[in-house]
Amino acid sequence: MIALKTVIALKKAALWIGGAVLLLAFDLLGRTLVGSLSLPVPGPVLGMLLLLLALMLYGRVPRGLALVGEQILRLLVLIFLPATVGIYFLRDLAGGDWLALIAAMIIGTLISLTLTALLLARLIRRSSGAQAPSGERHES
């Protein structure tokens, strides 16, 4: 029983490492292309676009990449921590600047939430339509 759990854990670790290597490889590829071709795009952005293209051609997300992606999404909040701390250094802004900054944050958040809700609604409609029996299609 313990040996089976160990084998499963090792397989999951191997998948995770494979997914991480895939992410790093596309990051390195993007950085290399940007450096060698002097493109006006950040290397990691080009690498992720190349990864997106590769996944579209492959037709699905490999399990290892999905595992790594889940972990990264769980830690996504840590990416915003430096920006939040950076607000501290903006304390010398004039009152009008603060008003513009707060308005931009609120409007940006509302746009983001609206687009996320619209995408979720569309995906739910598509999912419920795909799960209906062949003769019946759910309409909302």
Image (cartoon, rainbow, N blue to C red):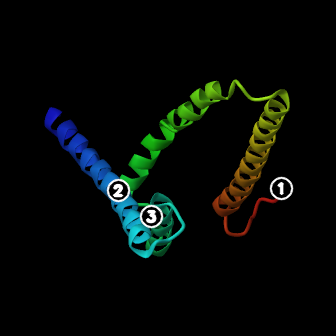
* Residue type marked 3: Gly
Residue bearing mark 2: 24
Q: Is residue 78 above or below residue 118?
A: above
2 lies left or right of 67:
left
Q: Nearer the viewer, residue 17 or 130?
A: 17
Residue bearing mark 3: 47
Mark 1 is surrounded, within 10 Å at the Cα level, by few (under 14), some (14 to 19) or many (20 or more) other residues, namely few
Is label 2 in a helix, a strand or a loop? helix
The tag earlier along the polypeptide, 3 or 2, is 2
Work out how far the residue at label 3 is from the one at label 2, CA to CA, in angstroms.
Answer: 9 Å
Q: Residue at x 50, y 71 (%)?
A: 39
Is label 3 in a helix, a strand or a loop? helix
Q: Is residue 88 above or below residue 107?
A: above
Residue bearing mark 1: 140
Q: Nearer the viewer, residue 46 or 65?
A: 46
Furthest residue to the left? 3
